[in-house]
Image (cartoon, grey):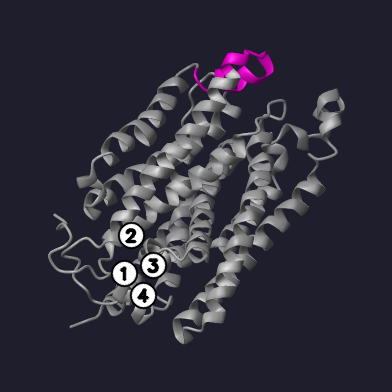
Amino acid sequence: MMTTDQNLTTAANRYSYISLAVGLVGLAVGVIGAFTGSLERFFQAYLVAFIFWLGLSLGSLAFLMIHFLTGSRWGLTVRRVNEAAASTLWLMAGLFIPLLFNLKRLYLWARPEVVQANPVLQMKSVYLNVPFFTGRAVFYFATWILLAFIINRLSARWVKSGEPAVKERLQGLGAFGLIVYTVTMSFASIDWLMSLQPFWSSTAYGLIIIFGQLLSSLSFAILILNVVPGLGLGRNWNLRTTPIPFKDLGALLLTFVMSWAYVAYFQFLIIWAGNIPGEVSWYLDRIQGGWLTVAILVAVLLFVLPFVVLISMKVRNNLRLLAWLGALIVLVSFVNVYWLVIPAFHPGQFSLSWLDILLPIGMGGLWIADFLFTLKMRPALREAEQTSLIPETGHESAVS
């Protein structure tokens, strides 16, 4: 009988090559379409795809740091998934390079003729200029990749040796890394997303993006746990009952659903109540000409439905139902990124291009291939950690 890790290696070898092929073909077709159609629309769709897949990588890195900081048992269930997802940051750094060479197609502040004609942009050019923008991006990625590398390396060492000193280093790095992640991602969200409309600003915007990343990455991890049963244990164990750490994933998912909705709603409420034209216009661009339907869809499927469903303890205790909900949240998270980005270029007029679908699939193929290749190489949990996840017979509810 093959163990879970042997099954994982076999499946990862097969599907990583399929994903790689899908990714290369998708991006190649997208590039051909861009040169025969509109380069501007290509990079708009490319930015949406990049922000979405980067969110899965960074959210996973954040969960790794939360797990090691708190010593949570629920973190053991998704640790290998998070480690593999965080390791894709080097790929995302490479995929960011095409954007650096096409900033003028995306950002008004990157066009000298526009800046010269606008006093506000001239004032903001101290921060919003191409060299400084590029330098900050390099710093962000160098920081994130270094954090992921050190944490994954220490984690593998902890699995192998079980030295308390290693665990303490992981705990300290988790505390430091969460602060660094929050600060760098807040600035990155300003650079890459908010500055698409440089005359608008919000102090809550970075937090909304961060909660969105945490929500989508947790949903993705839960989905993978269901696709590869026993992965959280790192061995061939039939998940006939639901251990408490797996139940905690449902409660955690509900927490981040509410956190994302809370910050997003109060940003809207404060701006709408203030009724300042320069601030309200950002929302007007996203609720007119068909965009309101997308906004309602995101609100219902990313908050209302998950909230109502996750209130039920029966759902929170069922990994299969959580996986279906997780798949929905991941999909709608992409729609949310689309709603944040595309109206900046097509305000008040709904716009959907075939590139908006093809490029996320192409980039996702590369991301999934890298994720699967790394996942099979991540070490299984330590024996003590595995044992802590096994439920006592008769004390937990069955998974249907």
Look at label 1 and name its amino acid: Leu
Q: Amino acid at mark 2?
A: Ile
Residue 232 at x, y percent in the picture: 33, 68
Q: Which residue is mark 4?
A: 385
Residue closest to the eye, 189 or 245: 245
Q: Is residue 39 above or below residue 389?
A: above
Q: Amino acid at mark 4?
A: Glu
- Callout 4–callout 3 Cβ contact below 8 Å: yes
Residue at the disc numbered 1: 231
Q: Main secondary structure of the magenta part?
A: helix
- Residue 269, x across and y down, in percent: 54, 21
> Residue under circle 3?
76
Quarter of image, res 205: top right
Mark 3 residue type: Leu
Dots 1 and 2: beta carbons under 8 Å? yes
Residue 398 on the magenta span: no
The magenta-colored residue range is 272-287
Secondary structure of the residue carrying tag 4 is helix
Query: Does label 1 or label 2 sit earlier along the sequence?
Result: 2
Which residue is label 2 attached to? Answer: 224
Q: In the displayed structure, would residue 158 be above or below residue 314? A: below
Query: Quick one: label 3 or label 1, which is nearer the N terminus?
Result: 3
The nearer-to-camera label among 4 and 1 is 4
At 42% from the left and 66% from the top, the residue drawn is 79
**Residue 67 place in picture, x, y as percent:** 47, 63
Residue drawn at x 62%, y 38% as measured from the top left: 193
Badge 2: how crowded within 10 Å, few (<14), some, or many (20+)?
Answer: some
Q: Secondary structure at mark 1?
A: loop
